[in-house]
Amino acid sequence: MKITDVQIVPFRTHADRFRNGQPFPRTELVQTLTRVVTDEGAEGYYFGGGAHGDQEGLLPDDRALLLGRIRSLLIGQDPFDRELVWKWLWVANIPEHVASVVDLALWDLAGRVTGQPAYKLLGGARDRVKAYASTYPNVGAPQVYADHALACKREGYPAYKRSCQVERPAAIRKGACPSQPSLLLPTGRRSAATASRPR
């Protein structure tokens, strides 16, 4: 089996967004569906790929990269050589969110061919996992996060992930439930200097 094409279908849709504590309901955005096609008819798909994963689509420059340089690299390759493809993309310094679109589409293809969900192919042995509540970046002041964490705890979530500035966690934890496990997604919010400075 060989990859014969990579396609991206962009389309307009709406989603609720938040910025600086303000809701922006039904914000129009461009979403994308990436499709990897093979000579044996098997296909793999990935929905999204923008800076917030599946919440929004690839930007035009990312689409051009995927349909140009990356597509030419993938054509003729075995879609099951996911680790080799990932290494090529990593060495080529392809942005991680774009490389992830390719990786996830290839995992989807493998799952469709084998009739197994991707988590089984990755070695998953559980039939249940604990869920956690999450925030969108810049929901608002620490008390807004704390109130949200408490509301999520009342709804039964055993843990709470926040996407916020690093200075806020102590205030959020103090205002919420100290016994509730708290996860932090600090991606891109610290420099090398501040990452090593204890708080």
Image (cartoon, rainbow, N blue to C red):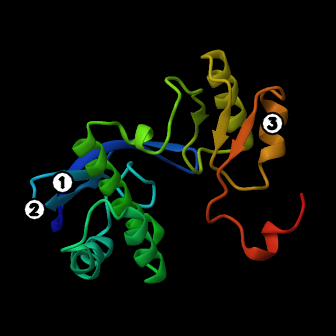
The front one of 23 and 173 is: 173
Instruction: Identify whether 107 is placed above or below 71.
Output: above
Which residue is depicted at the point 29% across and 52% down?
Answer: 46
The answer to the question of whether label 1 and label 3 lie on touching residues, with beta carbons closer than 8 A, is no
Amino acid at circle 2:
Asp
Q: Secondary structure at mark 3?
A: helix
The answer to whether 81 appears left or right of 139 in the picture is: left
Q: Which mark is residue 173?
A: 3
Q: Looking at the rendering, in which quadrant would you find the N terminus? A: bottom left
Image point (27%, 42%), residue name: 114
Name the spot of residue 196 as percent of width and height, x first.
84, 69
Q: Residues within 10 Å of mark 3 (few under 14, many from 20)?
A: many
Going from the N terminus, do you reach mark 1 or mark 3 first? Answer: 1
The amino acid type of the residue labelled 1 equals: Phe
The amino acid on which the numbered mark 3 sits, given as a three-letter code, is: Arg
The tag earlier along the polypeptide, 2 or 3, is 2
Secondary structure under the numbered disc 1 in the rendered image: strand
Looking at this rendering, what residue extends furthest in the right direction?
198
Q: Nearer the viewer, residue 140 or 6?
A: 6
Quarter of the image where one finds residue 35: bottom left
Name which residue lies at 60% across and 17% down. 155
Percent x, y for residue 76? Answer: 18, 74
Q: Check disc 2: other Cα within 10 Å, few if <14, some if 14-19, many if 20+.
A: few
Which residue in the structure is indicated by mark 1?
Answer: 11
Tag 2 near tag 3, CB within 8 Å = no
Which mark identifies residue 39?
Answer: 2
Q: Which part of the image, by quadrant, shows the C terminus?
A: bottom right
